[in-house]
Amino acid sequence: MRIDDLKVRPGQPVAPAWDKLLDFLRRFKLVAGPGVSLSQTPDGTFIAVEPVRAAFDHPFRVTAALTEARITKGTIEGIVPTIGSDPIDADHPPQLKLNGGPGKNGRSYVALQVRTTMGGLDPETKGVAEIVHVQTIARTANEIGLQPLAVLKWTQGIPTAFQIVYHNLGHYYVIQTETRGSRHLFYAV
Amino acid sequence: MGVLAYPQGEWQHPWTAACSYDNTQLCWTAKIKPGFVGGLDPSVSVVGEFAPPETLERLGHTPISARSLRLDAHLTEGPRMALNLWRAIGADGAAGVSTTGEPSYDPVPPALIALGASPPPTSSLPINQAPPPATAQDSGRKRFVRATELVIFQRRIATRTQWTFGQGIDETAAQFDVFYEPAGDERPTIRAERKPTLPPPDDPIATFLGAAQDTGVDRIPLATIYAISPPLYEADEMPGPDWQIHVRYYLFWNLFRDINVAPRLDESDGLGIPRGLGLGVADVSINNLAARINDTNDQLQEFLNANKAEAKYWSV
């Protein structure tokens, strides 16, 4: 842009030159790419660059793309969960569709959903352990437990995964009593 | 404009604190890799003008409008936490008192002593004759050490106790009630403490008298951050940009928790003091009750334990 483009003579409208100036300034806006964060302060902008770190292929590692997520193999009580009807350790591992996008707070969860039978997990039961995408961690029935594996934070339609579970899991079902509802306790094994 | 590139390294566990000296805030700061408690990433309190853009956007602020505010930034927003509460340990550390009445000092980790840190003085003198803190002149080329504690706090349902005096409906003259207060915002917070502050031990009599109440806040130590000076530093200086940082972690994985009670919040559980114990309404005072309740201490302890809200945390 030439400086002369911004000059306005008496009687000429100011708005076109002003718009050109704004367009010019927008070209200098700092945009944070992957691994970069910006801290804008009244005294200036601070750019922090985080390097790509070595990967740790732990169980249940969630990697989110635009509309799908990949989950590495993990087990709960020795059972390999499924996505839909396909186990996550299949030769062609299934990917989880991130249907529904984020919840009202801009977050959603990749979660492990278990279904108990007589208080335990029966490997023969269909859908005993399934990985699902949910907007809130809320149980729909006593026998169903939900353990978030990762939080997805959505910015401009793009999810970023923050891992919660790093281990294979055990599960303990606490039955309902007169004073308390039932609970599903998930723990690292 | 400032640029900070964190050192390249291996995989980092949740709660890893990347410490750097902030030339704007003129102090060391910690950026903590997001960890989660019950699926929630804790918040840290930051000065508005240094808050991450995502925090400002969530709270509807701009760097200028937030300049004089303190804001709660979630860990997933990438805040840098200012570390301003340091204590001296080692050669110039303040002496405490041990149970035997002798001065006691915060231990210096062996790894820092191997780097040249000055260990605490060794003395069997009583506290009023403890040796004065070291100075740069008498420290030779030793290095001084400062420490600060990072602690996670999380609210939970709290146990409250209350006395009611009067003619009870079932021939009771005084009623001791336990009730529960809702937790409010359960999002954990991370705060820096100069020294570890341990909660006071349970005292059933104090609880019974209403002198001690459950704080309703759980405290989980996260890490101790040590700063070690270059050699020949003045003893009273706080960590500057040329100091080195070492972190000792107590937490490596994300956490979930369960609370032992889940009462209806509008109900209380009461321990009635019947007339049969001789507690007439007219002469009832709490101190009087306390003296008399000694005989039923076991019953009281059992009652309080059964109604006390406690959280247990485990990793996933």
Image (cartoon, rainbow, N blue to C red):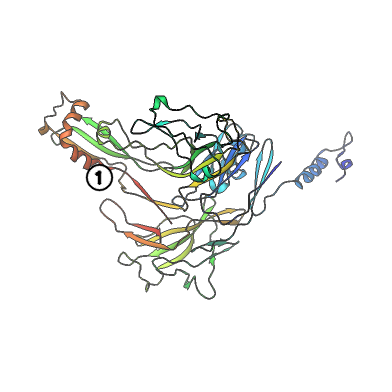
**Viewer can see residue B167:** no
Residue B125 to residue B57: above or below: above
Q: Position of residue A131 (x, y in %)?
A: 47, 65
Q: Position of residue B112 (x, y in %)?
A: 53, 43
* Mark 1 surroundings: few (<14), some (14-19) or many (≥20) residues within 10 A: few
Q: Residue at x 37, y 72 (%)?
A: A125
Left or right: B261 as drawn, with respect to B290: right
Find residue A39 and report its image quarter: top right
Q: Position of residue B64 (x, y in %)?
A: 64, 34
Give the residue at mark 1: B306
Residue B229 to residue A120: above or below: above
Q: Residue at x 83, y 41 (%)?
A: A17
Q: Amino acid at mark 1?
A: Ala
Q: Chain of mark 1?
A: B
Q: Which quadrant: the C terminus of chain B?
A: bottom left
Residue B291 to residue B8: above or below: above
The kind of secondary structure element at disc 1 is: helix
